[in-house]
Image: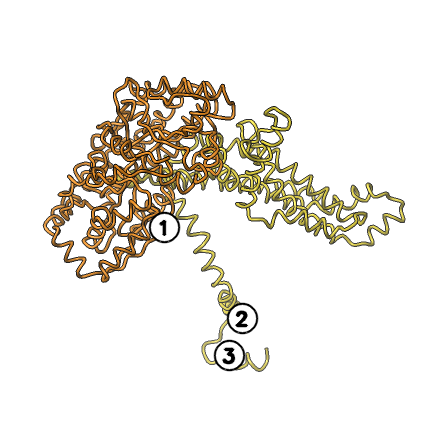
Chain colours: A orange, B yellow
């Protein structure tokens, strides 16, 4: 044991020197890069043309690539669906480790961006002058792609949380739509008592949902300062959330249908899952996958703890240029078009996406849109307001993809045992601390 | 030896007279080179796809690469850490339990099926042979998904039975039952395969033994005990070794069921799942390689012990 520990300490010492060396190298790279790239360079790259590979699983990707190739015939973009979220991240991580095989442009969700930024796998788009686009994006999404002073991606969609609810079910049982979490718990009890096959929502333990809920409650469990990390999943905000959610978990008031399963969609259609606190990208999913319930669903602001409107981001992501790209200027030019050009964003909005661009969020036509699926409700009024109410100051761990992968092992155990979430969170915390320290971070609790 | 070897001999005669013995060696070495030409293609592939990955895994297991700080040689630290890793041992104990319970059940069922088909008292034995073997032909992923839908307590057959009984009686996805549920799938998949091993061994028994037994007045049960089971010993050893290896490598079934039964199946449910998640979710390739090496050694040792015991029984 002592041998192991001294060896570990020695490794850490080596690690520290190596980190300095990497830092120095990175600095050199930045210097040479900044002199190379500007906005006009990107236009020149588009003129010159070339070939790019783009990994994405977004529904709008194919139409966007087609529109881009039409506008810039000299550029040939090969679109690859390398799998959805973690599947793609595994492939990307392997390509980064192998030193080849990564695409030029890649879709990465906000929660995963710190991890790839840390692996030094993403180009700082500031080198190509894209940092001047800051004002075009909602503050919360711009913050998510700026990591350690580097612009590692451009935001595509955003997912400010709102509460989607099945109005037909609420009307049937005469339950008022909750505006606070206390009312939400009361509604959960009332609904399940009136009809035991119905639940207020479904949750089997999902890391993305839990972190967003903690974010909304004011918890800031992850602190990052370079390689110094703090993990505190027992802070005041987190406990505020568990105080509410424990009542549902321990009271057996949650449907245990795994999210995104066929059964889950069925539950959303037949009213057995009555609400969904989820990101603003959900309407497109409901329309395409829960078509039977057209007219039943509405959207309301997230319930609050004390009446002050506040919400958080749930899901959403952007695109980045990888350092393996052989033509980073062209890749950056494509990315600028993809997530900033009105022609591209129009395609994106048509596919049911929720934008991160302020021009679209504030567009009166966008806000006035009456959704037929939502019984004529002006859903974007609620959702754009939510994007303004996102609480600032959240950060994800630089190894959030791994963290989420072990959520079921730890917090998930509280769900199956219908026990106190704080115990599961404490277990998650200790494993995150252990992993972080093993990976060379200095993690404090 | 006459016409073709003569010129060689005469050439040898020109140079200082060689002693008979070295010439013997030279002839043998020439034939060895010829043999090597036949073996080289195999050796190249063997080195490339077997020895090289194992060597690389051993190499990996002696290093530790971190997100911060890069790669460093750590000697046997990864092994020391693994031996104290509660998650690894939890998975190991789980597959051992699986092995101890599931393998005897599966082999007993396969044995009974093989004896029944071989008994010549079964109508349409060819049909039963095919039907029992058929699950083995179903891809594991498809089989597990199919069973997953039967097991589903919200939507599957299990939920229908529970509705009928009015209580939660059949719950294949709760922590207490999940291992039994997986055992059931694996048994379903592999009974036919083992049955075929046993059946083909039974077919090699000379029929005159049966005739002799009949003349001696032995009944069918006596034939099974005195002739068939002793003849099956080798096949049983082989089937047991395959099953041990299969149990320690348990991966597909729990990994696919995980999406249907989240939380119940952890990321370290079996050692193979642990190795997989260490490398692909946690980027701990070195720890993953260590798990692979340790499990490989343990499996080899246990399989070897079983083989030794089987061989000793055969001598007796």
**Residue placed most toward the observer, A248 or A70:** A70
Is residue B307 or residue B98 the one in the foreground?
A: B98
The span from disc 2 to disc 1 (Cα, nearest Å) is 71 Å
Q: Secondary structure at mark 2?
A: helix
**In front: label 2 or label 1:** 1
How many dots with numbers? 3
Q: Secondary structure at mark 3?
A: helix
Subunit bearing disc 1: A
Instruction: Measure the C-alpha gap from mark 3 to mark 1.
Output: 67 Å
The chain to which mark 3 is attached is B
Q: Is residue A438 left or right of residue B300?
A: left
How far from the left and from the top, in percent, is residue A31?
Answer: 11, 46
Cα–Cα span, label 3 and label 2: 14 Å
Residue extending furthest toward the front: A376
Q: Residues within 10 Å of mark 1 (few under 14, many from 20)?
A: some
Q: Are marks 3 and 2 in contact (CB under 8 Å)?
A: no
Instruction: Mark 2: give few (<14), some (14-19) or many (20+) Cα within 10 Å.
Output: few
Q: Which quadrant holds the N terminus of chain B?
A: bottom right
Residue pointed to by mark 2: B20
Instruction: Mark 3 and mark 1 in contact? Answer it, CB < 8 Å.
Output: no
Nearest the viewer among B100 and B185 is B185
Sequence order check, earlier mark of 3 and 2: 3
> Which residue is tagged 3?
B8
Q: Label 1, secondary structure: give it.
A: loop
Q: Badge 2 sits on which subunit?
A: B
Indicate the quadrant containing the C terminus of chain B: top left, top right, bottom left or bottom right: top right
């Amino acid at each position: 044991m002592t041998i192991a520990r001294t060896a570990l300490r020695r490794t850490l010492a080596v690690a520290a020197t190596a980190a300095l060396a990497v830092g120095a190298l990175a600095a050199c790279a930045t210097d040479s890069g900044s002199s190379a790239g500007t906005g006009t360079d990107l236009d020149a790259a588009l003129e010159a043309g070339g070939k790019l590979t783009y990994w994405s699983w977004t529904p709008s990707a194919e139409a966007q690539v087609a529109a881009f190739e039409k506008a810039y015939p000299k550029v040939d973009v090969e679109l690859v669906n390398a799998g959805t979220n973690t599947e793609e991240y595994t492939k990307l991580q392997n390509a980064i480790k192998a030193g080849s095989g990564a695409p030029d442009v890649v879709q990465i969700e906000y929660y995963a961006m710190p991890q790839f930024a840390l692996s030094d796998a993403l180009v700082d788009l500031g080198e190509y002058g894209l940092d001047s686009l800051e004002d075009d994006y909602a503050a919360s999404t711009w913050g998510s792609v700026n990591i350690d002073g580097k612009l590692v991606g451009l935001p595509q969609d955003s997912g400010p949380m709102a509460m989607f609810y099945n109005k037909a079910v609420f009307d049937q049982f005469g339950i008022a739509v909750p505006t606070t979490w206390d009312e939400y718990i009361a509604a959960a009890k009332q609904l399940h008592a009136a009809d035991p096959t119905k639940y207020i929502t479904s949750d089997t333990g999902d890391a993305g949902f839990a972190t967003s809920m903690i974010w909304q409650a004011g918890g800031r469990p992850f602190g990052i300062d370079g390689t110094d990390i703090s993990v505190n999943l027992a802070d005041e905000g987190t406990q505020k959330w568990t105080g509410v959610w424990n009542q549902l978990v321990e009271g057996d008031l949650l449907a245990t249908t795994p999210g995104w399963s066929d059964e889950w969609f069925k539950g959303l259609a037949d009213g057995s899952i009555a609400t969904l606190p989820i990101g603003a990208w959900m309407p497109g999913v409901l329309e395409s996958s829960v078509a039977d319930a057209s007219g039943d669903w509405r959207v309301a602001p997230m319930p609050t703890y004390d009446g002050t409107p506040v919400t958080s981001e749930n899901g959403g992501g952007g695109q980045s240029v990888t350092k393996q790209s052989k033509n980073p200027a062209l890749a950056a030019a494509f990315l600028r078009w993809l997530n900033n050009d009105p022609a591209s964003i129009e395609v994106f909005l048509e596919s049911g996406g929720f934008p991160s661009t302020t021009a679209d969020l504030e567009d009166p036509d966008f806000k006035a849109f009456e959704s037929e699926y939502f019984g004529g409700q002006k859903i974007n009024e609620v959702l754009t307001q939510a994007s303004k109410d996102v609480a600032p100051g959240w950060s994800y761990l630089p190894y959030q993809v791994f963290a989420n992968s072990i959520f079921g092992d730890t917090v998930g155990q509280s769900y199956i045992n219908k026990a106190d979430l704080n115990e599961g969170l404490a277990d998650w915390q200790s494993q995150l601390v252990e992993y972080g320290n093993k990976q060379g971070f200095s993690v404090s609790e | 030896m006459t016409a073709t070897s003569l010129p060689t001999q005469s050439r040898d005669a020109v140079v200082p007279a060689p002693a008979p013995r070295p010439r013997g060696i030279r002839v043998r070495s020439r034939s060895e080179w010829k043999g090597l030409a036949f073996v080289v293609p195999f050796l190249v592939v063997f080195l490339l796809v077997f020895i090289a990955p194992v060597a690389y895994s051993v190499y990996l297991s002696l290093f530790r690469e971190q997100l911060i700080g890069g790669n460093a040689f750590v000697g046997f630290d990864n092994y020391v850490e693994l031996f104290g890793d509660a998650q690894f041992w939890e998975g190991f104990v789980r597959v051992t339990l699986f092995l101890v319970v599931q393998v005897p059940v599966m082999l007993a069922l396969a044995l009974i099926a093989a004896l029944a088909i071989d008994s010549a008292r079964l109508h349409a034995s060819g049909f039963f042979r095919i039907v029992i073997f058929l699950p083995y032909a179903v891809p594991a992923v498809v089989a597990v998904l199919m069973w997953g839908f039967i097991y589903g307590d919200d939507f599957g057959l299990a939920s229908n039975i529970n509705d009928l009984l009015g209580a939660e009686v059949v719950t294949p996805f709760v922590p207490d039952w999940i291992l039994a549920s997986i055992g059931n799938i694996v048994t379903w998949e592999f009974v036919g395969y083992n049955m075929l091993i046993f059946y083909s061994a039974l077919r090699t028994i000379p029929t005159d033994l049966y005739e002799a037994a009949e003349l001696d007045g032995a009944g069918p049960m006596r034939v099974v005990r005195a002739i068939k089971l002793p003849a099956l010993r080798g096949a049983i050893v082989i089937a047991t070794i395959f099953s041990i290896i299969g149990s320690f490598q348990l991966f597909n079934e729990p990994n696919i069921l995980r999406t249907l039964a989240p939380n119940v199946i952890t990321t370290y449910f079996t050692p193979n799942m642990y190795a997989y998640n260490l490398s692909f979710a946690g980027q701990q390739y070195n720890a993953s390689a260590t798990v692979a090496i340790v499990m490989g050694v343990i499996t080899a040792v246990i399989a070897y012990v079983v083989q030794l015991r089987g061989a000793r029984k055969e001598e007796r």
